[in-house]
Image (cartoon, helix red, strand yellow):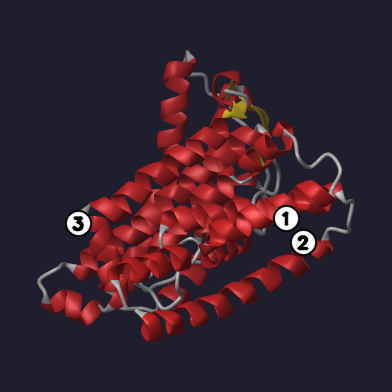
Amino acid sequence: MTPARRRTIEFLLDNLVWLMLITVLVIFSLTIPRYFQFGIFANILEQSTYVGVMAIGLAMVIISGNLDLSVESTAALSAMVTGLLFASSGIGLGIDLGPAIVMIPVSMLIAVAVGTLIGFINGFFTVKIGMSAFIVTLASFIWVRGLVVAISGGRSAQSLAPEIRMIGIERLFGIPLLAWISVLCFVIFAFIMAKTPFGRYITLVGGNEAATFRAGIPSGRILWMSFVLAGALAGLAGWLLAIRTSGATANLGVGMLFNAFAAVVIGGVSLKGGIGKLPGVYAGVLLIYSIHTAINLMRLPAHWTQVILGLLVLAAVLLDTLKLRLRERLL
């Protein structure tokens, strides 16, 4: 096989999800009234923000050969902490730190710190203690969500400080600022994964951890850092979600994990580890929320979203298996 043909096949396999997204958008635009308009596409970008940021960290953990089921609960806890501190009604304390230039970074850093701590705990038990990442993060999914209810008493924090809330209101070139934050996160971490030693090490560890360790690469440190980053990004997603809802409730973000997981798998990240690119994950997120929007515009029952999402995940896993076989056979 010629190098040019090999590169073409690799490009098609790596970007298949983008072709699926374009196809779906064209079909929906032609068949659903009012779908093909700028406001709808801007809404899709905004709705995908929180799951998109969360999916970045989840994808990195899966590429490293592990799994993190706690990102949804981590985002909920970060959102609740943000609401508890900076919302002025319900259980919110209404803390005022002054102008937006202070309130915005401080509130964001607190939310990210909450997520980072949970990611650190997950990494500790997985890497240092040697427990299964599935069990550790499943336990975190449960106890962190319980902590959300505990600190809130089942009540909500509403009316987030206007200095922070402005992030959810402002637009740039007609697109919500929240969506731009998500795009920026994908650009930054796509660069890290593709162009830095750390990103390449994550992929190598996921492909063959033993060989990576023998090559002198600190695989344990890399794995631990992937959990920390997943937690930090989930914390950021929770902060953005609190901004969008102007506060937090005890059940905020329920179901986000399944959307994030679906986006990662649909985006071409292999569950076996060592394979996957973040641009594909972003396409997977946009594909999911394009379908959500189409279902809403057609006024179909909400359960059809779950049916279609489940079928998409199944198709994505099947596609992943076929792509691996094609790579082995043709490349």
Q: Using a 10 Å C-alpha cutoff, classify the residue at mark 3 as few (fewer than 14 neighbours), some (14 to 19) or many (20 or more).
A: few
Q: Residues within 10 Å of mark 1 (few under 14, many from 20)?
A: some
Whether 258 is drawn above or below 326: the answer is above
The residue labelled by disc 2 is 305
Report crowding for label 2: few under 14, some 14 to 19, many 20 or more residues within 10 A (C-alpha): some
Q: Secondary structure at mark 2?
A: helix
Which residue is rendered at x = 51% and y = 34% of the image?
A: 180
Residue at numbered disc 1: 291
Q: Nearer the viewer, residue 143 or 174?
A: 174
In the displayed orientation, state which residue is furthest to the left.
216
Q: Which residue is mark 3?
A: 197
Alpha carbon separation for disc pair 3 and 2: 39 Å
Q: Secondary structure at mark 3?
A: helix
Quadrant for residue 60, please give it. Answer: bottom left
Mark closest to the chain's N terminus, 2 or 1: 1
Q: Are marks 2 and 1 in contact (CB under 8 Å)?
A: yes
Tell whether 13 sits left or right of 304. left
SS class of the residue under badge 1?
Answer: helix
Instruction: Give the residue type at disc 1.
Output: Ile
Q: CA distance from mark 2 to mark 1?
A: 8 Å
Whole-angstrom CA distance, mark 3 to mark 1, is: 36 Å
Q: Type of residue at label 3?
A: Pro
Front-most of 35 and 125? Answer: 35
Is residue 307 visible in the rendered image? The answer is yes
Q: Amino acid at mark 2?
A: Thr
Counting from the top left corner in percent of width and height, residue 92 is at 62, 32
Can residue 73 be seen? no
Q: Position of residue 161 (x, y in %)?
A: 59, 23
Q: Tell me where residue 249 appears, x and y as whole percent.
A: 68, 44
